[in-house]
Image: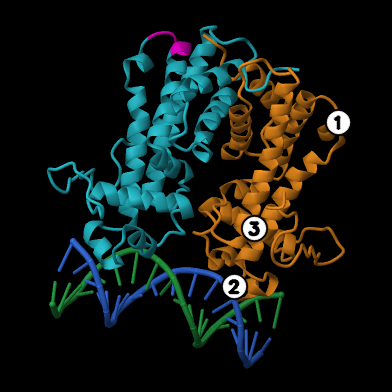
Chain colours: A cyan, B orange, C green, D blue
Amino acid sequence: MSAAPAQPPGPPGRTRRARGGAGARRPVYDAQSLLAVAVAEFNARGYDATSMEDLSRAAGITKSSFYHHVSGKEELLRAALERALDGLFGILAEPAAQNGPALARLRHIIGRQVEVLTAELPYVTLLLRVRGNTETERWALARRRAFDATIASLVAEAVEDGEVRAGVEPWLAARLLSGTVNSLVEWYRPGRPGSELLPARVVEMVSAGIVPPA
Amino acid sequence: MSAAPAQPPGPPGRTRRARGGAGARRPVYDAQSLLAVAVAEFNARGYDATSMEDLSRAAGITKSSFYHHVSGKEELLRAALERALDGLFGILAEPAAQNGPALARLRHIIGRQVEVLTAELPYVTLLLRVRGNTETERWALARRRAFDATIASLVAEAVEDGEVRAGVEPWLAARLLSGTVNSLVEWYRPGRPGSELLPARVVEMVSAGIVPPA
DNA sequence: GTCTATAAGGAGATAGAC
DNA sequence: GTCTATCTCCTTATAGAC
C-alpha cells in the first residue's frame, strides 16, 4: 500500500468542465472529450507510437490548438489511467466486496470487474498495456498490483476458510483469474446484444470451468 | 487462411549462424544472440519506446556496430514474431492435435501452449503485445487470429459432439480460454521450481474451474 | 567489426500573430 | 481558440575511416 499511493504524481485531478450545458456539439473540445479521443488513438496505435500530431488530427484541430486544451501527452495518459483505476478501486469499496464470506465477495468482485471493464473499456485497456517507462506509468502499475494483490488475498482467504476445494493453489488461481477477466479488453466490443449477461457468464465459467475435464 | 499467409513479409528467415561452435562467448554478436537481447529490451520498454541506441547499448557496442549485424529494427521484430508463431503453429501440426476426439485434442493443445509460452516466453510476449502499426505487425496479428480461430473451431466441435456440457457458448469459451493461457506472459518467470507441472495445472483449472461455484 | 560523424526526418512543446 | 512558424532533441539509418 505504501508503495502504491492513491494520489497520482503530477497535478491532482482537475476535472474542469467546459461549460454548464451537457449538450454535445460536434467538434468537442472540453477536457473529457479530448481525453476520449486521445485514449482511442493510444489504444489503436499504442501510447508510444501515437504522436501529438496524431491526436490533434483525430480531434480535428492543429497540434498547437490541441496544446491549448491539454498540457501534454503524459498528462492525458495520467488522466486516463486515473479514471481506469478509480473504476477498479471503486469496486473494492462496495459493501458486497467488504462483507460476507470470502468466496461470495470474490464472486461479486469478478462480476463487477467485468462490468467496469466493459463500461470503461478504453481506459482499462490502456491501463492494462502500460509498461512502466515514466513515473506516471510506474504509479499506475503499482496501483494495479495493489488491486491484484487484494484479489489474491481474497482467493487465499477462501481457500483457508475451506470454501474452495482442496488442491487449488491460491497464487496460481488468482493470477489465472485476473488474466481471464482482463483478457476481455482484447475482444469485447460494446453494443453487441447480450452484453448485460456477460458478467454472470464470466463468473460461471471461471467457476465451473471453461472447458470440462476429460 | 488466405488472409494469414505462413510466410512473413520481407526476406524469409535467413537464420545464419555465426560460426560452427555452440560455445557462448560473453559478448555474443551472432544473429540469434542479438535477437535475444533486442527482444528482452522490446519487452521491457515496449517495441516503439525502444530505440536502436537502447539495443546497441544492451549489446555492449555502438549503434553503428549494431547495424553491421542487423538490418534494422523491424527486421528484428519480424524474426522474433516469426519464432513465436512457429512455436505456436508447431503445436497444431502435432499428431495429438490432429487425431482423436475434439476435447482431447483441445486439452492437448492447451497444455502444449503453456509449454511453448514458457519455453519461448520473450518471443511470445512480444507477439501478444503487437498492435498492428506496420505490415510486419499486421502479418503477425493475422497469423495469431488464425491460430485462435483454430482453437475456437475446436471448442465448437467439442460442443457439437456433446463432449462439453450444455450451456457453454463456444465463442465466449474460446476467447476466455485463449485469454487465460496467454495471460501467463504477464507473470510467468522461468526458473521457479514446479514449472514443469504448470501445463497440467492450467489445463485442470480451465477445466474444473479456477474458483468453484457458490 | 568497430568506431566517429552526420544525414534526414519526426517528436514534444512553445511563440506569437490573428 | 486557432493558426503558422519554429525550437530543440531524439529517431532510424548510412558514410567512411581504421
- Quick check: marks 2 and 1 in contact, CB under 8 Å? no
Residue that carries the numbered disc 2 in the rendered image: B62
Q: Residue at x 66, y 46 (%)?
A: B144
To which chain does the residue with label 3 belong? B
The span from disc 1 to disc 3 (Cα, nearest Å) is 38 Å
Where residue A90 sits, quadrant-wise, is: top left
Label 2 vs 1, first from the N-terminus:
2
Q: How far apart are marks 2 and 1 (CA)?
A: 51 Å
Going from the N terminus, do you reach mark 1 or mark 3 first? 3
Q: Which amino acid does label 2 sit on?
A: Thr
* Residue at 34%, 32% in the rendered image: A87
Residue bearing mark 1:
B99
User: In x, y percent, where is residue A32?
Assistant: 26, 46
**Count of residue discs:** 3
Callout 1 and callout 3 share a chain = yes
Q: Residue B37 carries which label?
A: 3
- Given residues A84 and B39, the one toward you in this image is A84
Element at badge 1? loop
Residue A108 lies, in percent from the top left, at 43, 17
Instruction: Identify which residue, B3 or B24, lies in the foreground.
Output: B3
Where, by quadrant of the figure, is residue B211 drawn?
top right
Q: Nearer the viewer, residue B9 or B192?
A: B9
Q: Position of residue B72 (x, y in %)?
A: 63, 69
Q: Which chain does the numbered disc 1 sit on?
A: B
Name the quadrant of the C terminus of chain A. Answer: top right
Marks 1, 3: nearer the viewer? 1
Mark 2 and mark 3 in contact (Cβ < 8 Å)?
no
Amino acid type shown at disc 1? Asn
Identity, as a three-letter code, of the amino acid under mark 3: Val
Q: Is A47 displayed left or right of B71 in the figure?
A: left
Q: In this view, does C15 lie above or below A153?
A: below
